Amino acid sequence: MDTHFLHHVLLHLHIFKNAGTTFDRALSKLFQDQMTSYDTENPGARISIEHLTQIQQAHPESRVITSHQVGLPVPVYSGVIFHPVFFLRNPIERIQSCYHFEKDVQKLMNDDVTMEMYVRRNLNNPKINACFGIQLATIADNRYIKNWNRDELTDIVVNSALNNMQTARCFGLVDRFDESFEFICHRLETYFPELTKNIKPAQQNISEASKNIDDKTKYVQDNLSKETYSKMLDALKGEIILYETAQKVFENRYNKYSKRT
């Protein structure tokens, strides 16, 4: 296939509290007006394959599209190739980040709302939410998830997410953000020469949590009752499998890349 006439689009699957803002700001500096950020007015909506096609066709000059509401698979049609990119994060450590961000930055809850109360509320929410299911649901084939309910996150969905992660050209880990950014640029620079520019992303909304995961996961455990912590681990089972597998895949890929550079 002659790739000269193909239009390549970097598609950022922006998962809440997964370093997406930092990644987007770096991309914005590189691509400027060739980058489109798009979310619907409904914060709980998801963007279908058909809708993503419409977004791309409405912004044919865009070489980057980023959205909190887009997932996989990507559209396939003549002349356009999407390159999905996403970041994954330790799902236990991630909970404290969601809690503090929603409480201290977004001011979505009163000061007296404890982490115990926050986690229990999200556990009782049958919908896929910021704490439970969002990473799996974004990376898996979203045609398995019709109603955005947590009970739809079956073994089939977990296996789909694992497969999509393992076959992705590149993805990142929040706790290894700098290495991830470097590797993503390396893997995609053939299609996006802008990524060869020496740019160091200014980290936004990446808390110290990502730098000392053991301490922060212990912090979560210490601030939850044994019952709630146990239920949390059970609810995160699929995402823990996804993250731990992603760590091994990334380590293997990055080691091979670093030995060649």
Image (cartoon, rainbow, N blue to C red):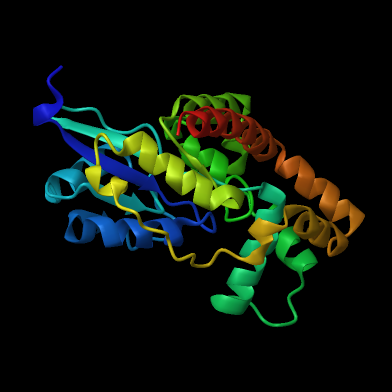
Residue 249 in the image: x percent, y percent? Answer: 58, 29
- Residue 58 at least partly seen: yes
Q: Is residue 180 left or right of residue 223?
A: left
Seen at 41% across and 56% down, the residue is: 23
Seen at 51% across and 52% down, the residue is: 178
Q: Residue furthest top?
A: 1
Q: Is residue 208 above or below residue 65?
A: below
> Where on the picture, by quarter, is residue 101?
bottom right
Q: Is residue 1 left or right of residue 165?
A: left
Q: Is residue 55 left or right of residue 242?
A: left
Q: Residue furthest right?
A: 226
- Which of the two residues, 205 or 181, is positioned nearer the viewer here? 181
Residue 238 in the image: x percent, y percent? Answer: 66, 35
Residue 138 in the image: x percent, y percent? Answer: 48, 42
Seen at 33% across and 52% down, the residue is: 66
Q: Is residue 51 above or below residue 166?
A: below
> Where on the picture, by quarter, is residue 154?
top right
Quarter of the image for the C terminus: give it. top left
- Residue 124 at least partly seen: no
